[in-house]
Image (cartoon, coloured by chain):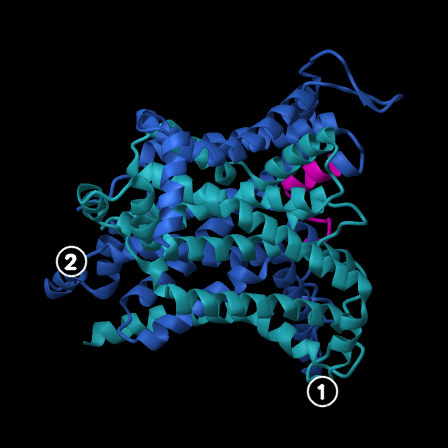
Amino acid sequence: MIRVLDFLESLRATLWPRAARRFEAAAFLLPALLLVGVLVLGLAWMADASLRLLDTETFELSEHWTLANYRDLLENDTAWIVLGRSVLGAAVVTAVTLALAFPYAWVMVRTGSAWLRKLLLVSLFLPFFIGQVVRAYGWLIVLGKEGLVNQLLGALGMGPFKMIYTYGSVLFGLVQYMLPFAVLLIAPAVTAIDEEVELASETLGAPWWRTFLEVTLPLARPGLVAAAMVVFTLALTDYAMPVILGGGTNDFVANMVYDAFFRTSDSGMGSAVAIALVAAATLLAGVLLTWLGAGTLGFRGEAKR
Amino acid sequence: MNGRRARDVVLWSVVAVNLVALAAPTLIILGASFTAGNIITFPPDGFSFKWYEKVFASETLRDAFWRSLQASLVCTAASIPAGTLAALALARRRPRFPRTLQLYLLLPFTVPLIGSGMGLMMLFGELGILGQVWPVGLACCIINLPFMIWAVQASVNALDPDLENAAATCGAAPTHAFFTITLPAVTPGIITGALLMFVLAFNEFLVSLLLTDANTVTLPVSIYNSIRNVITPDLAAVSVVYILVAGLAIALLDRMVGLEIFLKSKQS
């Protein structure tokens, strides 16, 4: 073991002399910077394509740059309807998810039973690790036209109800998909709240719901902000739930991007929609991050002693 | 005390709703996969393994499974060094422009997946590497890299810098200190991160959908393609693969670092 280390050390001393130490941070960061660089390059490529118009005769993008795709997009009524549906959907999903996730995170952190905490954690990680397609498929079995709920209702002489391929089913699927993200972002913030503060509020005679709303909730703000941001952007830009549980009748923006690329083969227009979405989401995240701080999202440097 | 009881009733009702919503798809799929009937009904038409037999016999599904496994391994192998080194640099080596760096490294999260996926698809297409499995793994590594950095950084922050300083003062060469002090201390973070990266790559759908063609479909895409038609129990049997992988990953995570690590406050 020591010999291997000595060998590595002499290798390092030759290849990476002490004088080079000040470049160490850069060298350590290089692989990660390059990987994210590939993403940036892809986005640049797409930005370039978004500035070229599709020639409908040759099906090739134009040589010169033009803003025509963006202009067409602004004048496209369907695009505005899809955008409105996505934004409204994301807002509803964010509100419902946070309302469900906060009590879950609180109970998980505060419970005195290690067994219960484990159960709540496993229930959270299992769906998180199972993936969107499989979960959506599960909901199809439950909510489908000949699904389990309709079979049960049919046995009682009711229905069948159309639950799948509706706006509601897309939002429902999204909430279920977002719950683990939200809880895992909120929980560390709840842990950071001193339980004594909540007890003090109770001792001073505040009813439990006031303690919850006026003490716990504001103190958990870093986690709530991070969760709201992640849930909103993920819901706004989701592809799988609208396509599987919406069945093409309730498209979100990402479905529009996909269709532009693969149905109408207009990669210029598809790129324009995608770039607009990327710009909006990044801007929103950037504003929130600078304005409210990274919350529980940031990479934290220096450990506190 | 009465107030407390009211609180518990309200909070527990919400938690119960959560639990049902979280567990329902998993339980239903598990149940449906063992049916003896040709469609999914409730109560199930008897018990059998016939859908599992059908799934194991299917070459398409087996190939898709291996491709998913390959892509996940590529993703994990690439993200371990990249994420670990980046986390060490961010926490210990005071890089310049920390704020810009932070925003840049968070780009995979702030850029919507459909944007990253399409951009990578166009770039990879131009480079002529589409239609292979490793670019899917690379793409999964890029889009989830912040998870790896987070996981390792949590461990680095828990390591007292004085330990590393002590090693240096006592004359340990930098490489010795790195391999005997720093690396063992951050191993739990690396394990957590690697498991996350593996599992997320294994079930990544959208990026797989964009980067694969008919000959290179991964398992999630293969399931998605079959969903379109009639809902038959064979898909439930395939999906059980995911439930097993998820269960295994959770057990490993709990065994090696403890799931409670995710509840730790980031402020203290």
Q: Which residue ends up furthest to the bottom in the rendered image?
A: B46
- Chain A drawn colour: blue
**Residue situated in front as seen by the camera: B152 or A287:** B152
In the image, A91: left or right of A205?
right
Q: Which residues are magenta?
A: A246-260
What number is the disc on residue A197? 2
Chain shown cyan: that is B
Q: Position of residue B223 (x, y in %)?
A: 72, 60
Residue that appears at 30% across and 34% down? B93
**Residue situated in front as seen by the camera: A249 or B77:** B77
- The amino acid beneath tag 1 is Phe
Please name the residue that numbered disc 1 is placed on: B47
As drawn, A72 above or below B104: above
Residue that appears at 54% across and 61% down? A129
In the image, B85: left or right of A34?
left
Helix, strand or loop for disc 2: helix
**Residue situated in front as seen by the camera: B197 or A7:** A7
Q: Which residue ends up furthest to the right in the rendered image?
A: A57
Q: Are marks 2 and 1 in contact (CB under 8 Å)?
A: no
Residue that appears at 28% across and 73% down? B6
As drawn, A277 above or below B196: above
Quarter of the image that includes the N terminus of chain A: bottom left
